Image (spheres, grey):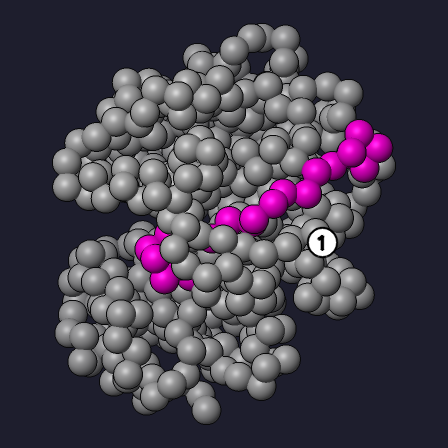
């Protein structure tokens, strides 16, 4: 299997190359050239398997023999052994036909662990094989940074530098990053805002001279391996609720569209899915595009579900590529227009998307009301991101007979302030993290100056 760019102008890559590469050289994102498909029997045979075994079966065709089966199975097993629940991503039944998929049992209590626990191990595997080292740089306002650090802390051939805005991330989120004291983990608190941090990371990718030839790797959600790892829990949940014999629907709290796109891939491979519901917060570009064909940027709004605060959904490009019948030139021209002005999708691709996707936007007031409503009806305290999903699922589902699975993307203790605003204070951290607020921290404060940051990276990375 080869991987091709959504804009049609970059060279096709192998799996190894696509794991080590972020964005394609033509500005597009990599997708598989062809998709494998699950036979009826292949799905039926997954019933009762462990999460790691399902993961191995779902991802094997994408790895394309570039890692031998024994080694790949071991990487997968190790990645998911870091989760504190045996089922890794368990389902919880809320009422007759509404389920929660708990994606918060990983090391940082949010769904990004599912992909990043595997991605760190894949990167380290390929780097060791090549006898190379690499540097990861990323900017974070919270979830991605801590999940990336946890995914890379044991990687011999990787050093990771995560920039966060000084004094502007929540205490739990900061400590999840800064209390990892591994030799290859460097937390940098930038005296500036998230955009300053992000701009310095972008500039470092654009000109990598400061690294003297060492590879710089991105672990943001455009990396194909993250999508690949996320397909697995859709298959596992579908099979647990009766696939291939029964359809399910999924409702996904969405921002960059990486999570729900992985579900769509699983559907394209043969998982019987009735409907995907995209839940957004007030940053509603996905909802505006689907509901009103208004594909345009709005200003960023700071909401109670901060991990969904985005202006542009980067992975939506992968869905557009499919909707435009894999016409890279059409995708490139649409996204070029989008950079400069409000635009709209062509009728045929939009109609195709509307057959499978519904959407709903949930503002802060509705998030708080939903946390209370869900508790009254089910006894569950939802985090604010999951609350957008619960709300959207209840209102946008196509029918009441098909089971709907809402993805619970974060643990409520991770967003304790918002949950307290809804009236639930003191939601405890899980037992394995209950000393987080006492753990030793390590981070370096630097000015928001590119030179200072790049000097810090160059001096501290290991040879
Ligand atoms: C990242 C994140 C999301 C959004 O996921 P996308 O793949 O960007 O759509 C939702 N909820 C939480 C808690 C997250 O960390």
Residue at image location 15% in from the left, 74% down from the top: 449
Q: Nearer the viewer, residue 355 or 424?
A: 355
Residue at image location 23% in from the left, 44% down from the top: 336
In the image, residue 56 above or below residue 454: above
Residue 87 screen position, x and y as percent: 71, 43
Q: In the shown orientation, is residue 208 left or right of residue 412? A: left
Query: Which quadrant of the figure contains the N terminus?
Result: bottom right
Q: Give yes or no for residue 29 being in the magenta stretch.
A: yes
The magenta stretch spans which residues?
A: 22-43
Residue 65 screen position, x and y as percent: 72, 62
Residue at image location 68% in from the left, 66% down from the top: 66
Q: Nearer the viewer, residue 210 or 50?
A: 210
Q: Give yes or no for residue 455 being in the magenta stretch.
A: no
Tally the marks.
Answer: 1
Q: Which residue is mark 1?
A: 60
Secondary structure character of the magenta stretch overall = loop
Residue at image location 20% in from the left, 56% down from the top: 195
- Secondary structure under tag 1 reads helix
Q: Nearer the viewer, residue 127 or 37?
A: 37
Q: In the shown orientation, is residue 274 left or right of residue 346? A: right
Q: In the shown orientation, is residue 68 left or right of residue 143? A: right
Residue 27 screen position, x and y as percent: 33, 55
Q: In the shown orientation, is residue 88 left or right of residue 139? A: right
| Residue 407 visible in image | yes
In the image, residue 113 above or below residue 346: below
């Amino acid at each position: 299997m080869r991987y091709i760019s959504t804009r049609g102008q970059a060279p096709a890559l192998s799996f190894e190359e696509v794991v080590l590469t972020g964005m394609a050289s033509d500005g597009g994102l990599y997708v598989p050239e062809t998709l494998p498909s699950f036979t009826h029997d292949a799905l039926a045979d997954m019933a009762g398997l462990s999460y790691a075994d399902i993961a191995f079966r779902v991802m094997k065709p994408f790895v394309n023999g570039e890692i031998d089966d024994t080694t790949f199975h071991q990487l997968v097993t190790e990645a998911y052994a870091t989760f504190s629940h045996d089922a890794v991503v368990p389902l919880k039944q809320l009422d007759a036909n509404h389920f929660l998929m708990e994606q918060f049992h990983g090391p940082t209590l949010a769904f990004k662990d599912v992909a990043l626990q595997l991605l760190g191990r894949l990167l380290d595997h390929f780097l060791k094989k090549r006898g190379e080292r690499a540097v990861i740089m990323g900017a974070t306002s919270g979830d991605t940074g801590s999940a990336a650090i946890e995914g890379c802390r044991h990687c011999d051939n990787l050093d990771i530098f995560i920039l966060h805005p000084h004094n502007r991330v929540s205490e739990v989120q900061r400590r999840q990053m800064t209390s990892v004291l591994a030799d290859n983990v460097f937390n940098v608190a930038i005296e500036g805002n998230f955009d300053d941090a992000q701009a310095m990371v972008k500039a470092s990718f654009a000109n990598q001279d400061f690294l003297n030839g060492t590879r710089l790797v991105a672990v943001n959600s455009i990396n194909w391996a993250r999508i690949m790892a996320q397909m697995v829990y859709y298959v596992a949940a579908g099979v647990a609720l009766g696939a291939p014999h029964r359809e399910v629907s999924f409702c996904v709290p969405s921002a960059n569209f990486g999570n729900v796109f992985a579900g769509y891939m699983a559907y394209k491979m043969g998982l019987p899915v009735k409907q995907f519901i995209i839940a957004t917060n007030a940053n509603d570009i996905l909802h505006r595009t689907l509901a009103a064909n208004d594909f345009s940027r709005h200003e960023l709004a700071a909401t109670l579900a901060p991990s969904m605060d985005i202006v542009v959904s980067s992975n939506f490009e992968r869905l557009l590529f499919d909707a435009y019948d894999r016409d890279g030139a059409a995708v490139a021209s649409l996204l070029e227009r989008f950079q400069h002005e409000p635009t709209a999708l062509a009728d045929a691709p939009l109609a195709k998307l509307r057959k499978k996707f519904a959407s709903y936007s949930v503002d802060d007031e509705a998030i708080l009301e939903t946390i209370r409503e869900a508790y009254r009806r089910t006894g569950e305290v939802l985090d604010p991101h999951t609350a957008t999903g619960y709300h959207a699922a209840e209102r946008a589902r196509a029918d009441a007979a098909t089971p709907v699975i809402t993805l619970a993307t974060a643990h409520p203790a991770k967003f304790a302030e918002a949950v307290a605003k809804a009236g639930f204070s003191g939601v405890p951290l899980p037992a394995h993290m209950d000393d987080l607020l006492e753990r030793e921290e390590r981070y370096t404060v630097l000015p928001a100056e590119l030179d200072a940051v790049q000097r810090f990276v160059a001096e501290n990375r290991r040879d």
